[in-house]
Amino acid sequence: MTSSARREPSTVHHQRAVLHIHGEGRVIGLEENLAAWALASVWRGIALYPLHGPIVITGRARGGGEVTLDDDLAQHAHTVE
């Protein structure tokens, strides 16, 4: 990540998961991430705005920190290249 790139704070699309999304992905020309968009939209229950660039998914601790993603949620997500 260059010094001019900005990371958006983590966003919650599921109460037990956090999607870490690049905040300037569209602006700097990263491709749309349709797989992450579809997963986040299903978890959220609505069609969301497009997501751009690589997405990292982690579990969410009660205090708001990151933890390992629960097995049942991990079954929904996998690496797509």
Image: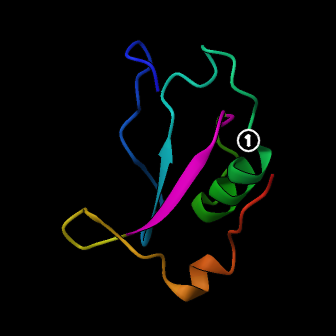
Q: Position of residue 61 (x, y in %)?
A: 28, 72
Q: Position of residue 29 (x, y in %)?
A: 69, 17
Q: Position of residue 72 (x, y in %)?
A: 59, 86
* Placement of 64 over or under 27, stated as above or below: below
Side of 27 relative to 18 (left or right) = right
The type of residue carrying mark 1 is Asn
Q: Residue at x 41, y 33 (%)?
A: 8
Between residue 63 and residue 25, name the one nearer to us: 25
Q: Residues within 10 Å of mark 1 (few under 14, many from 20)?
A: some
Between residue 5 and residue 40, name the one nearer to us: 5
Rendered image quadrant of residue 51 = top right
Q: Residue at x 75, y 33 (%)?
A: 32
Magenta extent:
50-59
Q: Position of residue 70 (x, y in %)?
A: 49, 83
Q: Is residue 57 magenta?
A: yes
Q: Which residue is mark 1?
A: 33
Side of 13 relative to 75 (left or right) = left
Side of 45 relative to 34 (left or right) = left
* Residue found farthest to the front: 2
Local SS, label 1: loop
Q: Residue at x 65, y 42 (%)?
A: 48
